[in-house]
Image (cartoon, rainbow, N blue to C red):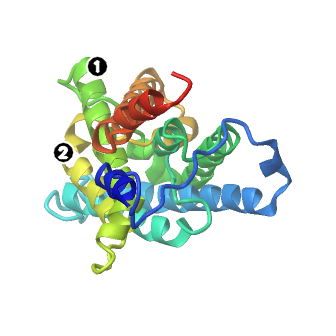
Amino acid sequence: MAKDDATAARGFSGKDYHDPPPAPLFDAAELGKWSFYRAIIAEFIATLLFLYVTILTVIGYSSQTDTDKPGADACDGVGILGIAWAFGGMIFVLVYCTAGISGGHINPAVTFGLFLARKVSLVRAVAYMVAQCLGAVCGTGLVKAFQKAYYHKYGGGANQLALGYSKGTGLGAEIVGTFILVYTVFSATDPKRSARDSHVPVLAPLPIGFAVFMVHLATIPITGTGINPARSFGPAVILNHEKPWNDQWIFWVGPFVGAAIAAFYHQFILRAGAVKALGSFRSSPSV
């Protein structure tokens, strides 16, 4: 009895939640499951819709505030606030719709962070990233098909470093912005939080979408806000201008570094992964 009490006191029993087992690094069995391909399709369609709505919003705002256009008013349009709402709102909607199928990543950086935390396998992570990039290209392509003249005139919604900012500033903005997003994803989907706050209905897509909204408010003037390599890649491919391609590395390196830092911080600092691993090593009878 005393042993059980001591074990419980150390926190090794009596947990009211269960962490899912780590995803295998390479699981070939996934390739034979329909659920795997269904999840890839969900990521592709979700990213396509995300780019379609958000890029249309960006181009629409540019059109409404074009002072050279008859009837346009620089004070009209959704503004930066409206653009931020479009990105955050679409993430909320699409994560809500696809979370039960693929997890609702819709972002290669988020997928990378979850892979580092062993929440998705390498096979699934790579497949998701490819689907997300293809969805972004197709979603942006639809925007160009429907509004070709406006698309080229107003820059195609492509991300690029704004005038007056150094590449280091842009990279830092992308790292910190993606850290905020991925940190929010980990926190909102933490099984320990779900068990602890079971009396409070917490809808995970809501804080994730709100994090995207807040980051856009802060970084739109700097980089246009990437924090999602697929979002930056799709418009760069369809627009195919030199400036977005020259700055493209910022929108890949920054988000991947930010996602890696967020995964490490959440898993090894907040969830004490390193301490648990050390404790298991010390308690092993073979040591």
The residue at the point 53 percent across, 66 percent down is 99
Residue farthest toward the front in the current orientation of the protein? 1
Left or right of residue 178: residue 102? right
Can you say whether 87 is above or below 178 in the image?
A: below
For label 1, the SS is: helix
Give the mark nearest the N terminus, 2 or 1.
1
Q: Residue 132 appears at what percent x and percent y?
A: 59, 48
Of residues 119 and 2, the one drawn nearer to the viewer in this rendering: 2
The residue at the point 25 percent across, 48 percent down is 215
The residue at the point 34 percent across, 44 percent down is 271
Mark 1 packing: few (<14 Cα in 10 Å), some, or many (20+)?
some
Q: Quadrant of residue 283?
A: top left
Name the residue carrying label 1. 167
Q: Which mark is residue 53?
A: none
**Quadrant the N terminus occupies:** bottom left
Residue farthest toward the left in the current orientation of the protein? 75
Residue 224 appears in view: no
Of residues 20 and 98, the one drawn nearer to the viewer in this rendering: 20
Q: Amino acid at mark 1?
A: Lys
Q: Residue 86 appears at what percent x and percent y?
A: 34, 63
For label 2, the SS is: helix
Q: Residue 233 appears at what percent x and percent y?
A: 52, 37
Name the residue carrying label 2. 218
The residue at the point 61 percent across, 51 percent down is 135
